[in-house]
Image (cartoon, rainbow, N blue to C red):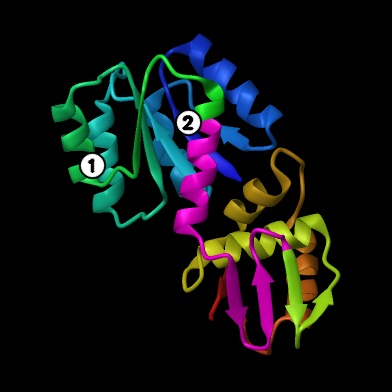
């Protein structure tokens, strides 16, 4: 799982980031909330956490902009605002969950996992191939297919963005993180997936990236 945390309190931001990553959840968190646009442009996330009271932009405005641009990623509001009116505004703008500070980190973790399950199908059918998202397992003609962790991460990213071109930059960031890799290694993993998936399922857009059509 990979989340974007938009929180301007440096101490809370770093402690949450450490907690989530200790729970095997990759967490990106800009020190300046205005940079969230760049993070969304180059990464795909399973959930977004937004504080409402930020330094430069209101969290409500970020929420509204994300939804206006058509992004359907689950969004959890994390704030000290506890009035029902504030909750009404956020849910109307498209928030999926609302957690009031102070809170237990464990509760945040449980809510993120619940959001991920609600918004993602457990089984994805790709021709004669079935991807078990929760079990991180592939089956072809009902027979399990062995797949590496990185190949699965690449496939999962493309499933999240099925029907859309996933740029090479997004793939590098999501699958390899800060590890320096080139286009050749991505092409190698694309070839691995093409050997497993039905013919013409993955389309190459030269100089841009790849698209999964299912």
Q: Determine whether, in the image, residue 30 is placed left or right of residue 99.
A: right
Q: Nearer the viewer, residue 152 or 87?
A: 87
Please name the residue that numbered disc 2 is placed on: 5
Disc 1, disc 2: CB below 8 Å? no
Please name the residue that numbered disc 1 is placed on: 91
Find residue 153 and report its horizontal and vertical position in percent.
Answer: 69, 57
Figure quadrant of residue 36: top left
- Mark 2 surroundings: few (<14), some (14-19) or many (≥20) residues within 10 A: many
Is 133 above or below relative to 172?
Answer: below
Q: Secondary structure beneath disc 1?
A: helix
* Count of numbered labels shown in the rendering: 2
Find residue 99 and report its horizontal and vertical position in percent.
Answer: 37, 28
Is 166 above or below relative to 91?
Answer: below
Q: Is residue 209 visible?
A: no
Q: Which mark is residue 174?
A: none
- Mark 1 surroundings: few (<14), some (14-19) or many (≥20) residues within 10 A: some
Is 87 above or below relative to 155?
Answer: above
Q: Residue at x 44, y 19 (%)?
A: 103
Figure quadrant of residue 167: bottom right
Q: Determine whether, in the image, residue 206 is placed left or right of residue 94.
A: right
Q: Residue at x 70, y 37 (%)?
A: 24
Q: Can residue 202 be found in the magenta stretch? A: no
Q: Nearer the viewer, residue 53 or 140?
A: 140
- Magenta-drawn segment: 108-136
Q: Which residue is at the far right?
A: 146
Q: Which residue is at the far left?
A: 85
Q: Is residue 112 visible?
A: yes
Q: Residue at x 72, y 60 (%)?
A: 136
Q: Can residue 119 be found in the magenta stretch? A: yes
Alpha-carbon span between mark 1 and mark 2: 18 Å
Q: Residue at x 79, y 60 (%)?
A: 185
Q: Which residue is at the far top?
A: 11
């Amino acid at each position: 799982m990979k989340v974007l945390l938009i929180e301007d309190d440096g101490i809370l931001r770093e402690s949450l980031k450490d907690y989530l990553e200790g729970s095997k959840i990759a967490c990106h968190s800009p020190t300046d909330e205005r940079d969230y646009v760049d993070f969304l442009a180059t990464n795909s996330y399973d959930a977004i956490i937004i504080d409402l009271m930020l330094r430069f932009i209101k969290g409500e405005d970020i929420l509204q902009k994300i939804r206006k641009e058509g992004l359907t990623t689950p969004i959890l509001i994390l704030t000290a605002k506890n009035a029902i009116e504030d909750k009404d505004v956020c849910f109307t703008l498209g928030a999926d969950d609302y957690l009031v500070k102070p809170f237990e980190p464990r509760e945040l973790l449980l809510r993120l996992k619940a959001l991920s399950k609600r918004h993602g199908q457990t089984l994805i059918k790709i021709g004669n191939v079935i991807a078990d998202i929760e079990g991180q397992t592939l089956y072809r003609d009902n027979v399990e297919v062995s797949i590496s962790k990185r190949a699965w991460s690449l496939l999962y990213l493309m499933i999240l963005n099925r029907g859309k071109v996933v740029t090479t930059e997004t793939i590098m960031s999501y699958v390899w993180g800060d590890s320096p890799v080139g286009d050749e290694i991505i092409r190698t993993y694309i070839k691995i997936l093409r050997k497993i998936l039905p013919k013409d399922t993955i389309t190459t857009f030269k100089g841009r990236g790849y698209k999964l059509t299912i």
